[in-house]
Amino acid sequence: MILMWEEKNQTFPKDFILLGFLHRNQYGFLFLTLILIIFMVAITGNTVLILLIHFEIRLHTPMYFLLSHLSFIDILNICSIVPKMASNFTSGRKSISFAGCGVQIFFSLIFLSSECLLLSAMSYDRYVAICRPLHYPILMNHQISVLLAAGCWLVGTINSTIHTTYVLNLPFCGTRAIDHFFCEVPAMLKLSCIDTSHYEGGINVSGVVFLLLPFSIILASYYQILRTVLHIKSMEAQKKAFSTCSSHLAVVIMYYGPGIFTYMRPRSYHTPGQDKILAILYTILTPMLNPIIYSLRNKDVLCALKKVSGKLLVHRN
């Protein structure tokens, strides 16, 4: 009877252990405080941007519609990782349930893959607006922007469902200790008892679709934008365009670069330290920088912010 119970009990999924990257000392608490500040800035900045786009009529354009989806993804993405990480650190408990790990993989993959596609859609919008302004109402209107956003979410969800289903059905051995601060596919593959080289080929295919191809589209779009800008006689307009494009590309490279390095390398080349640092860039820092780069340097958004702030002050008085 006892033997039967033990055999039955072994069929139930066990909890995983998230080793994290913070140690419970003064430096760990200091770094956690910094991460929580970044977390609050990211949540506040993206929430304010979504509200401005929703309530300000002048921002009801395809570009800002896509930007609102980017902010929404960033909020969900950082919320799926930082609270659990902070909770594990402060409580000293590093465990995460099998179901919780599956949920974290599922949603983080949706947000990461959808954002990759959405950033390329935004670059296409800017290309049409600057390089083909007369055709903009036809090539990029509200209906097309809705289809693009919906397509990003749909394809990202399909991709996430496939990978999550496969990873959670792998046989895991040993202590189930994930050397990461959240459940990420490359880190979990190291715990598998079987050879996953065939599946890694599928990851590379997804990497081409969600990383290399969108990144190439973005580079091609900004190349055409810069070519068009160079024909503008106004030096001030050129400087403004170069400044905007360079800041956008900096964020794009900081997002796609670590993603390509993480998901398109063979498992044998992965080291926990590198993976954790790279993950911080595209899961924590980028959600904070996106609203700053894409909005606070934008005159339309700043004008809308001043307008709404003025109305709130008048209402309060």
Image (cartoon, rainbow, N blue to C red):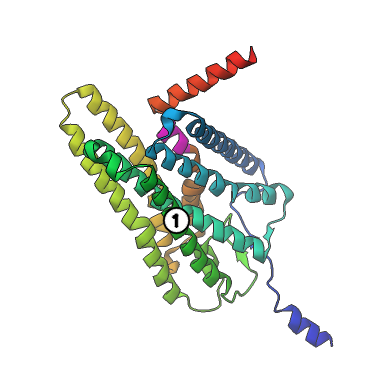
Horizontal relation, residue 206 to residue 72: left or right: left
Residue at 61% of width from left, 39% of height from top? 36
Q: Which residue is mark 1?
A: 113
- The answer to whether 184 is drawn above or below residue 84 in the figure is below
In this view of the protein, which residue sits in the foreground, 35 or 216? 216
Task: Examine the residues drawn in magenta and state their main secondary structure.
Answer: helix
Task: Name the quadrant of the N terminus.
Answer: bottom right
Horizontal relation, residue 302 to residue 40: left or right: left
Which picture quadrant has residue 243? top left
In this view of the protein, which residue sits in the foreground, 172 or 132? 132
Residue at 55% of width from left, 56% of height from top? 107
Task: Tell me the amino acid under the disc marked 1.
Answer: Ser
Horizontal relation, residue 51 to residue 126: left or right: right
Residue 211 location, x and y as percent? Answer: 37, 56
- The answer to whether 34 is drawn above or below residue 176 in the figure is above
Task: Tell me which segment is drawn in magenta.
Answer: 289-296
Residue at 49% of width from left, 20% of height from top? 307
In this view of the protein, which residue sits in the foreground, 33 or 111? 111
Residue 192 location, x and y as percent? Answer: 55, 74
Task: Name the quadrant of the C terminus.
Answer: top right
Residue 232 location, x and y as percent? Answer: 17, 28
Res. 265 visible in picture:
no
Horizontal relation, residue 136 to residue 96: left or right: left
- The answer to whether 294 is drawn above or below residue 18 in the figure is above
Residue 74 location, x and y as percent? Answer: 51, 44
Pointer 1 local density, CA inside 10 Å: few below 14, some 14–19, many at least 20: many
Q: Magenta span has 175?
A: no
Residue at 42% of width from left, 37% of height from top? 64
Q: Regarding mark 1 in the picture, which secondary structure is present there?
A: helix
- The answer to whether 26 is drawn above or below residue 239 in the figure is below
Which picture quadrant has residue 60? top left
